[in-house]
Image (spheres, grey):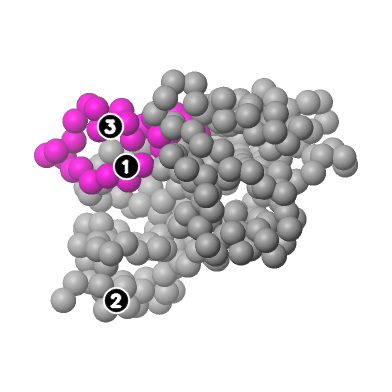
Amino acid sequence: MTADLAKLALVTGGCRRLGARIAERLAASGYQLALHGHSDSQPDDQLMAALEKTGVRWQGFVADFAAEGAAGQLVEDVADHFGHAPTLVVNNASLFEYDDLGSVNQPTMEHHFRINTVVPTLITSRLSGLLKSGDRAAVVHILDQRVRNPNGDQLSYTISKQALAEAVRTLARACAPQLRVNGVAPGLTLPTQDYAPAQMTRLAEAMPLGRLSDPEDIAEAVRFLAEAPAITGQTVFVDGGAHLESYDRDFVFLGKD
């Protein structure tokens, strides 16, 4: 990164849930923020409080990644608004819908691949094209621990994330030396209403480290990779050790009474 280029992070899906916690951590580290949302770009209450506390410059951007050209246009819109390309992109936005071997179909697979694999790749490509001589930037793809030991649940989601995980090394090589590309693979982090409290406790106890990942763990891993100038092409699993085990089903089916 050149000396006169302010730290600017584009976080896709950055207004809610895990994306918001990543954005919050980056704001605390002095990053200006471009926060992307699918249909609105209003930060959740916790993130908004953090933005007000830190006083960092930020702007929301709306983009429907199902639309042709939306990925590249988002990067250009961010660069136009802030006056330079992002110095960090966190590809956090993803599609997560259930299917398995019996229900998978072409439209479902194509939709997952577009959002989870094609869009992050195109965003990375466009960012690389916007960097000027001497600029340095980083990309962090948010993956999933299941890419290491998959099961048959969420088939389209899993395969699309596996493709993105493999793209980390390929993009790192293609984009060097100006752009570093790494991945962070969380485990079960923010449960949905499908999980009961007792189930979460049992799942945590079943992890090799006896705990699940929390949003702050993921956010800190992203921040570290964003500021580690000698690291590229790496995936860091932040999952309580879940990737070391093989599970028969998705976590939502395990640990129930």
Secondary element at image label 2 = helix
**Quarter of the image with the C terminus in it:** bottom left
Q: Which residue occupies the foreground of this view, 11 or 63?
A: 63
Please give the count of numbered marks on the rendered protein.
3
Residue 203 vertical position relative to residue 233 in the rendered view, above or below: below
Q: Is residue 122 above or below residue 161?
A: above
Q: Residue at x 67, y 47 (%)?
A: 58
Q: Which residue is mark 1?
A: 157
Furthest-right residue in view? Answer: 3
Which circle's residue, 1 or 2, is located before the other in the chain? Answer: 1
Q: What residue span does the magenta drawing correspond to?
A: 95-121
User: As drawn, which residue projects farthest toward the left?
Assistant: 102
Q: 96 or 77, which lies in front?
A: 77
* Mark 3: few/some/many CA within 10 Å (<14, 14-19, 20+): some
For the residues labelled 1 and 3, the Cα–Cα distance comes to 8 Å
Q: Of the two numbered discs 2 and 3 on the same chain, state the one appearing first in sequence.
A: 3
- Which structural element holds mark 1? helix
Rendered view: 214 above or below 152: below
At which x and y percent is residue 210?
A: 40, 77
Given the image, on which type of amino acid does mark 1 rest? Tyr
How far apart, in angstroms, are the residues tagged by discs 1 and 2?
25 Å
**Quadrant of the image occupied by residue 56:** bottom right
- For the residues bearing labels 1 and 2, Cβ distance under 8 angstroms: no
